[in-house]
Amino acid sequence: LNGSVYTTTQAFGNNSTLLATTAFVQAAVSAENINTTAKTAAYTLATTDANTLVQMNGAYAFTVPLNSSVSYPVGTQINLVALTAGVTVAFTSGITAYYTPGLKLRAAGSMATLVKLGTDTWVLTGDLAA
């Protein structure tokens, strides 16, 4: 072959035997990086927080909204980190939540992960305290 060969770029996550284009590889590599956002007041999670790391700087709450307000796909993960003591998680009334031992991130530097299990069902796991 002489010259350049061009092809279409497959959709991200395509695991077929098609050749991977440079664009496909760059998208796959950048998908390994997690986006982060920083909050300094009580915060209700938004669609853009899916599969990210949300930082809380202050003794405030992360609030998990009902599916009717923010429709995350089942399996969505949201990582939380407390930059100061006193950070909590609050579930909107109507959500079934699984967690132990409590809804408080234990200390500054504590991390937790929310995983959506069903329409209005979440699990919270990580460095938690009662």
Image (cartoon, rainbow, N blue to C red):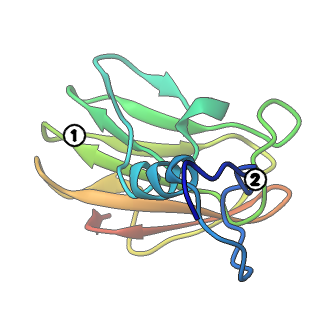
At a point 26% along the width and 58% down the height, the residue shown is: 111
Judging depth in this view, the residue of 43 and 34 nearest the camera is 34
Check disc 2 and report its element: helix, strand or loop: loop
Q: Quadrant of the C terminus?
A: bottom left
Residue 37 horizontal/vertical position (percent):
35, 28
Residue 88 horizontal/vertical position (percent):
36, 44
Name the residue beneath numbered marker 2. 95
Disc 1 crowd rating (10 Å Cα; few below 14, some 14-19, many 20+) is some
Up/down of 31 relative to 86, above or below: below
Along the polypeptide, which appears first: circle 2 or circle 1?
A: 1
Q: Quadrant of the N terminus?
A: bottom right
User: How far is mark 2 from mark 1, CA to CA?
Assistant: 22 Å
The residue type indicated by label 2 comes to Ile
Q: Tell me where residue 113 sits by quadrant.
A: bottom left
At a point 81% along the width and 30% down the height, the residue shown is: 69
The residue type indicated by label 1 comes to Gly
Up/down of 118 relative to 56, above or below: below
Name the residue beneath numbered marker 1. 86
Left or right, 72 with respect to 42, comes to right
Residue 108 horizontal/vertical position (percent):
10, 47
At a point 58% along the width and 44% down the height, the residue shown is: 50
Up/down of 128 relative to 40, above or below: below
Left or right, 116 with respect to 101, comes to right
